[in-house]
Amino acid sequence: MDPPRHDEKDSHPVMATATPLPPPSAPPQLDLVDSLCCGTDADIIVSPVAIPLPSSSPNNNNNATSAAATVVPPPFLIPTGTNTLSKLIIPTSKDWKPSTSSKLTKKCNVISISSHSNSSETKGLRKLSIPVTSAETVAFLYAAKKDKSIIQQFKNENDTTVIIDPIDATMAKHIENNTLDELKMKRTYRTAILTNGSLQFKKMKFNLSKTLFFDRDSGNAANVNVSLFDLRGVHVVPTTEGSSSGTSPNAINNDDDNIEGVVLVAFRLSDNNANNNANNNAKETIRYAAYQTPNVSRFLLPLATALASAYTGRPSWSIPVSWTTGSSYSQQLELPPIVRETYAEWMGNDGGFSAAVYAAALAFCVQRKVSLGNVLKNGGREAVAKCVLEQQRLTTMQGKQPRFLLNVGPKEIDLVKLALKLSNANPTNANVNAKNQVGMMPEVLILAGLRALSFNLVLRKLTLSGYRNDNKNKSLFRSALGQALLYNVTLREVNFESSVLTDLGEMIGVAWAMNAQPLISRVNFSNCKLNGKDLEGLRNGLARIWCGGTALAESIKLANNPSVPAKAWEEFFLAFVDPSTCGYWPRAPPPPPNLSFLQELDVRGTHAIGPGLLKFAPKLNGLRTLKLSSNGNKDDLSMATEILTSLAKAGAPLERIAGENLDASCDAALFAYSATLKELVLDKFRGDAVSLLCGWPQPVPALAMTIGSGYSHSSDPAWSSPSGFGFSPGTLTIFNDNSFVVDAMYILSSCDYENGLKKLTVHNMHYSQLLATAPMLTSLESFLVYPTSSSYSATLSIQRSMGVPRVAAFWSILAESKTLRDLHLPDQLVGGNDSDELAMVGRFLKTNRSVRSIGFDSPFLLLKVEDVKVLRSAFYGNKKVTDLEYPSKARKFTMDQIGEETKKLWNEVALCKREIKKLFQRAYSKYNSRWRDGPNRQKLPWVERIRVAKRRIGQIQRDQKKIATLLEEIKQCVRANKMAQRLQDETKANERLVRREGQLEQLGEKKKKFATNLVTKLNKAKLRGRQQKSAKTQLPRSTYYKSSNMWPSNTPPKKRNGNPHSYYNYYNDPYCTRPYWWYYPTSYNDTNDWMYGSDASIYEMDDDGHRDSDTDDAALGGMLSDVDGMTCEPDDPWSNVDALVQQVESDYGAVLSPEYIALLHEECSELGPDVVENIRGTLDDGAAVSSKLDEIGEKTDAPPEMIGNIVDGGGFDLAAMDIALADIPEYEPGDSIDSDDAGDVVDMYAGAGPRDLDDGGPSFGSSRHAVLAGARRRARARKSSRLMRRVREDTNRRLQMGYRRVDLITGKLQEDEKPYGNMWPRDLVESWVEETQAQQIKAIAKCNFDLPAVSTQPIYLLKQFSPDNSYLSSQNEIDVVLVTQCSLDRLPNLRAQLTHWTGKTSVAIYLKPSECRVDAQLKIFSAIEEARNNVVQMCDGHVRFDVAVTLVEGCIDDEPYPINYLRNVALLEARRQHLRLNTSLDKSAVLLVDVDFRPSNHLFKALHSRYAARRILSERQVVVCPAFESLNETCANYVSELKKLVDGGQAEGFHLSHFPQGHGPTQFDLFWEKSMQCNGRDVSEFWQRAYHIKHENLFEPYIAMASTDAPLYDERFQGYGLNKVSHLATIASQRGGDFTVLPGVFLVAPAHERSESWAKRYGTRSDETDFNRLALKGLYYNFTQNLESGGESVISDNTRSQNDLLWEQIKRMNEKPDECNPAPTQPGTGLKEAVLCY
């Protein structure tokens, strides 16, 4: 399409802010309509205009335009096209152009956007999981200084509440005045980062803390962070000298043609930085950013592509971005067309909705610096599309999806649920208006979803429930919602239930009144806080739709809007009874709408009952659902009765009635619907209810009545006596408000038990309270009782008040029933020691043989083994129960009780241990060697209590396993019963179907007749549509978006014969309602200032001041040229119906399904109300056959498959019918469009030559003949238009009957029954046992864990060191101390370890209470002496041997081995050992190992090298020494020897075969690879080939690390298990989980017997070992919770004091280094020893 002509003299300067247009002089102004769309919006701008108002007299239509008021018209999209940006002159001075292009080329480079890139510019976005599309460095231009005069002027002209940046304002004003040559600029380099939703100009180093829009850096240019939806213009001016326009049009893709230039970007001030209040209603604050780059093309193409993706599915004229280039370089910078396949991928199956929402989510996350949610992070745009598709509520038939629905894309959207899911918010919290950054994301996505709906051609139902619409964002919500409802032409249903829409009803009504093709048939504004003005606005919009005939009313829900006065309700209903009462029809009012298709009316909680509704009711002859309420006075009750009576006289087939505040005076009116009524809900009923309970004049087995909720007595609380001949509803639900159930049950028990009541549901009572009426219950088929929500004590109190015998009597009476099939008593049974009701249920099932489904789950039911055994015994003979509720609540209650009992038992154990500990502490004496004899005798009672507690804990686990086993057996019995019953039912059903085979064959013939009539009538309707004889022009929906002339404008419309002309064909608006809303009595003068990008500054105008043609922007229009107009809809409007017709043959079994009929009705409704009328009777016939088949299925209990095999046996031959049907011409869009009024007429004239026109063009002799020919075409069009109007009016009057059988309103009126069935787990026993243990673990974890008893005892230090001068005086770069611990029986292992480690060692040795300290010292000295001699021999006399031994003496027999306490003792002594020769711990490191391990020969050398000092001390790395175990006593010293043992199967990685989690993360394969590459003697190669690993759960390596970095061990871990794992987890949390493995060296442990501590925890299975394992699990769970919360390791007071003293010593050394510097010990020849007591 050619770009529009644009004369410079007609152009207007671009304004930085949009100034409202002044209203014209007009008659007195009335404030009738509030602003239609307030606030700024990414896609629309608004100006106040004047429109005519209706006369004050509703019947005086001639004066409908006698008054005017200042109102705001509907939203207007900013079209594209050239604007005054194209007239800007970019100076070429040095301020705007770099001195040398080479400098610009050198600095401006493309930045890598790869996910593996280390670029700091995009690292921040990758951290937020934001995919970057393009990034490069550019020269950012900004004003050198701010102009104070301009700033002052700028502030005077604009709202002061808007944040204005001085430098940005200076530049904006110069752009408006086109005086950029006077503006001095500065240059700084920025990173331009583009995503699919945002554009940013950032500092070179990306910083997440500085990404706000007005982030100022010392007065320099601000960072720019703008959403693509806020972008308003891109202007490109090349500055390369000598460039010509003869370059290839595809130069933008040619990297060799670098076009150096200035790019000027205009964007709207983001909502994040603007104050969204009433003062911003009609303006946009425009900002500008300019940058230079040596190649403008490499960033413009991704930007244009991102824009196209964000605006997918929208016509090019609606994209509010002006894209212009310098005239001499337009071809060089021409954007290539988008590939259709790519655009189709963006469109998806939701018409581009997901693409727009995804772009908005990206923009929000970038601007707010929050990470994408998990859903968006993992799936991107496809994840949004998947979430949209998951919202479709497509029901299934016969266990599978019907084929005609398999390919149906998304048809409905719930914006709140979608936004919450994409934001990772809690779906149960509907508050989408949170204040925090992440909490604001749902609201942003909701607004984006509304804007995306504007031009969407796929979605048909909008749900926006629970949106608060607070004052802060009210203007944004108004504009987005108004835009969606104005432009969308596919929505058929809107659901705004519980959303706050106060003062928005007028805007919604105007948007619908001006919509080109409104198809709204179902509206839900329940609980929206509407007022009278809102309802008046909705009335106007709905009258334009339903009276105008573009759609049929099917559902109206306006419940719970008490602020609407009664007068407004009366006017609302009268508008549809007599449209002339509205007074706003410009011409003669239309006939009343056809309300026969209205199936649901909900006006509960309102003042709707009145004369208006009474006149409205007789029109509702197809109403199926009515919900209303009275205020309780006599007049209202009388009016409600008249309304019900009027509906009955009209023949309304009411199936559902819900009434509030009604009484017995309405009984007779309700009885009139006995034949059709299925559901009756009476809330807040008053007075006598006997007639409703048992006084119906005829049997009503299908009626489900709910009564009693909010019940109140009338003036006479006494109820009348039952007549004795009435009937009761088949299903009755009663609530015990004001003792209603007590009275109702008395009435029902006094009636005949055969009065029709089969299903009874009682609320707010305990089942045992119905004992007096228990005989009546035996005649029921279903009995459900829901108690009042209460506590355990309240339920137990009721049970005790009734007494166990009376409760047992109730079950005994109920067991006699022979009809009861369904019995559910949730939340009522009490178990444990308080009651044996579960056993009563078991005895009931032993006697009763009729119950098939039973549920008794209760949150107060404690399962006992004895009770479950009784229940299990019932299934030895009961083969009837096929559905048993899984006791999930009882399971949870039982587990909670287990946790509490376990906690008490654990506290009992802890108490006993503390008492035993006190006994030993009091008896301690260093002078009496037998001081333990007394405490050992006194502790026996405490030990026995410990044993009893431990046995009880084990008994709990065994009992629960038994319960789980019994429940599993019950489950298998129920499953077997279900399978046997299914076979039996199928056999009986087969026999019943054989007797009904003739009837089914007749129904099969009726079904075939239905299909035949359906295909025939649809064929005729399609032929009428092709011949333009339908009541509605059948155009593709996308046709309405081909021209912007179809929509409201800021310019005055044309007039024809004194009447406004709408630029819109009259087929969809035969009563001219749209022109009323934007008709201007006077036109604006030429002095008006126009907003940025408004249509006056873009489009050329004709003589009447109207747009002469549609224009597309040259750049974006060309880019979208191949894809503009692509939609997800077929070209032919009948395509969807044709596809459904084809399914009649391919999926014949589903033709009568409710889904098929509803979908067919929906598709035909879009083709015109007359099409629906033509097939109305046929659909009724099909629904009648379907109802009959359902009835047969209920009576025979036959599955649908069996019935379908008989009914559909003959099939259906659609091909044979096609031969007899009339031929229908192919669809040609030009045949159905009015050539004068349709929007694409401009396109036809622009693209056709003179001889291509159908009138022959100027070949008749002169050019005037062509003009006359055009006039002839217009005359034909006007004639066709008049004919169509008559067809439309006649059809609308003729439509007087709706559906008689088809129910298109889905959903039950009655409240959903509480679910009582759930799935039994497959692995019931395993899951039950696991949960039992989990509850015990959690209970133990909440208790306090005792620290080792030895932590309160003194410790003794034995100092052993070598006096070698060379060793003592050496100054190594690193000093590594081996830290270990052991018991006295492990001294041989300690000796072997010391032999292989020639340096410092700190060892803590534990002495049992029975071991003598003196003898132990001699053994220790002997072992150390032997080790020292071995070291001397190995070192050729140069002794490097220093061992510090600390003795820890136990005090209680059989106490757990205090392993972590010993490790802390050794670790602290290792630090003191280093400080004896040093003044600080700067060079100190520790090697943390167990005593069983022997270091390899090169380990000492490797850890004392300068490489180790750099890695461990400087880089603070944690070095892993790989650990191995030998399967015999042979231990290798070198890697080569170890390799042979491993290859020979004599050694392996430590515990790798049975506990790989412990050392598997070391990656032994990689260790061998690195080690075999090393030179065995060169330790530098070890460190060069070191590799990094990550910590994993349960990883427990042996490590070397800086001494000061080593945390203390958690001393609660005693004995065997997880003690080292907990320490390594603490280190990993502090170090980020990074470890370094050192190849070439290792630790190896020979085969040895398991320790005594292992036997206590993992030895022979007993209550003791089970308890110890359970205690360890509880401790580890407590530790992990403490670690995750940032807590420290738990240590004893002794350890804490020793650690504090050590750091105090270091502090003193640093303060006085000379005084505290220790002198070297004098050399000697023997071992030095000294015993120190701490």
Image (cartoon, helix red, strand yellow):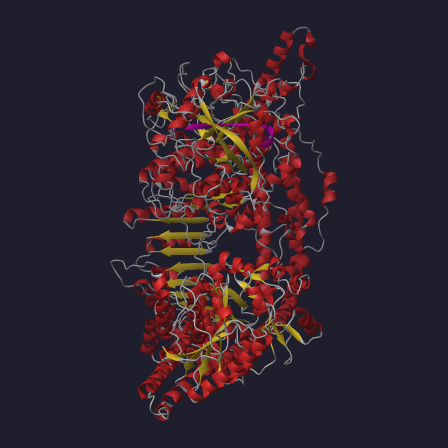
Residue ID at (49%, 35%): 200
| Of 816 and 1267, the residue lying toward us | 1267
Q: Is residue 670 placed above or below 1628 in the rendered structure? A: above
x, y percentage for residue 9?
48, 11
Q: Quadrant of the N terminus?
A: top right
Residue range corresponding to the magenta coloring = 281-300
- The answer to which quarter of the image holds residue 184 is top left
x, y percentage for residue 1307?
49, 52
- The answer to which quarter of the image holds residue 1239 is top right
In this rendering, does residue 1577 appear at all? yes
Q: Is residue 1272 placed above or below 993 in the rendered structure? A: above
974 left or right, relative to 806: right
- The answer to which quarter of the image holds residue 271 is top left
x, y percentage for residue 1385?
51, 85
Q: Is residue 1145 placed above or below 184 in the rendered structure? A: below
The residue sitting at the left extreme is 715
For the image shown, how many numbered marks are present on the structure? 0
Q: Quadrant of the C terminus?
A: bottom left
| Of 728 and 1120, the residue lying toward us | 1120
Q: Is residue 1506 placed above or below 647 in the rendered structure? A: below
The residue sitting at the top extreme is 1261
In this rendering, does residue 727 appear at all? no
| Of 1557 and 311, the residue lying toward us | 1557
x, y percentage for residue 1112?
57, 24
